[in-house]
Amino acid sequence: MALQNEMYRRLLGPGWARVDPARLESAVGGRVVLVTGASSGIGERTAELVAAAGATVLLAARRGDRLAEVAERIAARGGTAVPYPVDLADPESVDRLVAGVLAEHGRVDVVVNNAGKSIRRSLADTVDRFHDVTRTNAVNYLGPVRLLSGLLPGMRAQGNGHVVNVGTLNVDLPLAEWAVYSASKSAFEAWLRCVAPEIRVDGVATTSIHFGLVHTPMSAPTYHPRVPGLTAEAAAEVIGRALVRRPRLLVPWWARPAAALANVAQGPYEAAQARVLRMLRSR
Ligand SMILES: NC(=O)c1ccc[n+]([C@@H]2O[C@H](COP(=O)([O-])OP(=O)(O)OC[C@H]3O[C@@H](n4cnc5c(N)ncnc54)[C@H](OP(=O)(O)O)[C@@H]3O)[C@@H](O)[C@H]2O)c1
């Protein structure tokens, strides 16, 4: 698995290398870093990584018991982490999170917008489950926009900050049966692209990372562990490197040409997917 993970990482390109711990320490040491989705997967590993580099980490997700475990583990290793249970789909819960962290810490320097809801479902199966469309957009789009709308004024006023968005390759290469997930992640990306220049004026940087497969509880029901992908630890390292280098966008080297091709040849791109679906249905 370790070798497979390393080979997959090399396939993504040089921007996806491991982070230098000393450089991460100078980027986040002594800073207040909010990580959403810190109860599991990529967010949990990112919280551990930045806490080890000396940041005060604010852990946000719904499961308070899981957040408390992560905070205890971090404290046992000498780090500082504070759990903040929140449901991003609930606007009042998000407002309470913003008010709570600002009252208790006075500032937030970095937001890792990582919490997310994934949903792979055909259009036919979605029709009678519109609540899933609403909820996916609430978690992946509206909640993060509300959270950042509450935190960005402080970051702009202090004249520095960094927002790292944990995005997906589905934004570059939309796939059949991923419509609701892709649309919600794309909506947030569009919002971030529009506000990025506005907040950059005030010293706040933005980074979007478009991950392919990462083996976490989210991807486990869809992808066998042997399918090439990153581990959550490796994904956290990629986020750590982005915290140091602050690239505007991090995608695998082949994603831009592939996305350009899929855009230019939209008809053939969709026809190829339709052929696969037809084949699967006729089995
Ligand atoms: N895994 C992949 O292959 C992959 C690929 C590309 C992008 N991503 C993105 O990576 C991010 C992290 O996913 P993961 O793979 O690490 O999955 P994960 O292990 O399932 O983690 C998802 C996190 O989001 C939190 N969350 C879900 N709904 C929430 C809500 N309503 N309010 C607050 N927090 C909520 C979960 O915590 P609670 O359940 O405790 O609330 C959990 O901590 C997601 O944004 C996902 O879209 C993943």
Image (cartoon, rainbow, N blue to C red):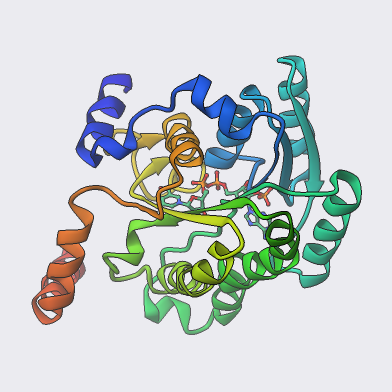
Identity of the residue drawn at 60% across and 53% down? 115
Q: In this view, does 184 lie to the left or right of 48?
A: left
Q: Is residue 195 left or right of residue 15?
A: right
Q: In this view, does 267 lie above or below 81?
A: below
Please provide percent x and percent y for residue 23.
Answer: 50, 26
Please provide percent x and percent y for residue 45.
Answer: 56, 32
Q: In this view, does 39 lie to the left or right of 80?
A: left
| Corner quadrant of residue 186 | bottom left
- In the image, 151 versus 71, the foreground residue is 151
Please provide percent x and percent y for residue 249.
Answer: 37, 55
Q: Is residue 280 left or right of residue 94?
A: left
- Residue 282 visible in the picture: no
Quarter of the image that includes the N terminus:
top left
Q: Which residue lies furthest to the right in this view?
A: 103
- Residue 71 visible in the picture: yes
Please provide percent x and percent y for residue 17.
Answer: 33, 31
Quarter of the image that includes the C terminus:
bottom left
Q: In this view, does 217 lie above or below 21?
A: below
| Corner quadrant of residue 97 | bottom right
Identity of the residue drawn at 66% across and 41% down? 39
